Amino acid sequence: MQFSDNQYQIQGLDVLEICQKFDTPLYIYDSSKILDKIATLQKAFQGIRCKFKYAAKALTNLSILQIFKKKGVGLDVVSIQEAQMGILAGYAPHEILFTPNGVAIEEIQEAVKLGLVINIDNISILEQFGSLYGSQVPCCIRFNPHIMAGGNSKISVGHIDSKFGISVLQARHVLRVVKAYDIRINGLHMHTGSDILDAEVFLRGAEIIFDLAKDFQDLEFIDLGSGFKVAYKPGDVITDVEELGQKIGAAFRQFCHQYGKEVELWFEPGKFFVSEAGYFLVNVNVIKQTPATIFAGVNSGFNHLIRPMFYDSYHEIINVSNPQGPLRVYSVVGYICETDTFAADRKLNEVREGDILAFKNAGAYGFMMSSNYNSRFRPAEVLIENGEVRLIRRRETMEDLLRNQIFEKETVPIAESNA
Ligand SMILES: *Cc1c(COP(=O)(O)O)cnc(C)c1O
């Protein structure tokens, strides 16, 4: 979002006009930001056989998936339904890596039927997989290297208490199972969680995986997951992908040399690709001055953007409709009937009732984690592509809320009612 000609614009379009046209609350995605991120990663890892698999759960709208498809980025999915979305968006099943956690063997069987690349994250399922398919269907193994990473305990998945992956300490057990069932292991995987700060942590994980790889002869790829940190506020430390590309690239080349085969290196970022591309636009319903603070109450809540309440995440806020107003301090709150704070003690250009506020970094885990709590409609989503804006998901209606309810209205005789 850029400020020029006295207005906030995305790809040259006036953001306020978009809000008027599509109404708020509204998710707006800027395709050019996604393309930038794809180009940045491709550049950072050029010169090695590298593939990117977009972690679709961050933002699964079909029109967004299509952007990745067109750019040759694969998909990483965590459920059969996400895989089906990917296929609808034009992906071939073999371009989709299926990385679920804790699913039943039946869901894995469905994934095999669809033709996805299978990633298994526990020994029990690996044994069942082996007895079903033997050497017929290859699979990847998700290891947990137990390196500490991640910005928030709810999203760090590499630690010793984590439920994700098979512990590297169980590698010998894995090898026994693989041998007993003659399973063909085509990939090794790790994903240590969001918000890894530096290349060193990645490298440590990578070295552990490279070391394990020596025991597997049929590898086609090594997947180092995600965890690319993005900036949420000015001054945030972000992953230096160029440095990462150089360091990982060098370590990977050396690994391939030792392994005796050119395997592929995969990454599966979600947030990195789409976070900055998304803005969440809301209208200010009410300004409430209390003895302690000034609340700006907006026409949304954690039912639409749960990250601040759930992860304590920081989202920069812009007053789009009063860009020149004097700065004042606000608590921006939602309309949900329990604590529902988007931001506390925020300096914003003076906020008036009817103003439009934009939350930045709303592309990843924004709409996707939205709900109908308080029986509110989920927002519409629009995409700006090639300088044009288009609706990619309609705002919900009463019909959506009632769709699956089974209900027969009782006719109460008038005499018996208290009315
Ligand atoms: C969620 C997830 C990702 C993406 O994580 P980000 O922090 O959004 O980059 C990657 N891989 C797997 C297996 C995931 O579950």
Image: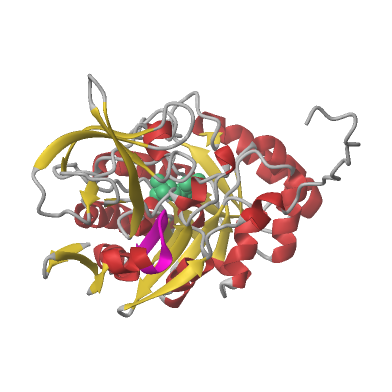
Q: Position of residue 63 (x, y in %)?
A: 49, 70
Q: Position of residue 3 (x, y in %)?
A: 14, 63
Q: Nearer the viewer, residue 13 or 161?
A: 13
24 drawn magenta? yes
| Position of the C terminus by quadrant | top right
Look at 27% across and 48% down and name the residue there: 230
Q: Nearer the viewer, residue 105 or 313?
A: 313
Look at 22% across and 34% down and name the residue there: 330
Residue 220 visible in image = no
Look at 64% across and 54% down and name the residue there: 398
Using the image, determine if residue 273 lies above or below residue 164: below
Residue 28 located left or right of residue 43: right
Using the image, determine if residue 60 lies above or below residue 235: below
Using the image, determine if residue 338 lies above or below residue 180: above
Residue 147 located left or right of residue 303: left
**Which quadrant would residue 177 be assigned to in this image?**
top right
Residue 102 located left or right of residue 16: right
**Which quadrant would residue 88 be assigned to in this image?**
bottom right
81 drawn magenta? no
Q: Which residues are magenta?
A: 21-29
Look at 43% across and 74% down and name the residue there: 390
Q: Position of residue 342 (x, y in %)?
A: 34, 37
Q: Nearer the viewer, residue 192 or 26?
A: 26
Total marks shown come to: 0
| Position of the N terminus by quadrant | bottom left
Q: Position of residue 404 (x, y in %)?
A: 75, 50
Residue 19 visible in image = yes
Residue 241 located left or right of residue 202: left
Q: How is the image coloured?
A: secondary structure
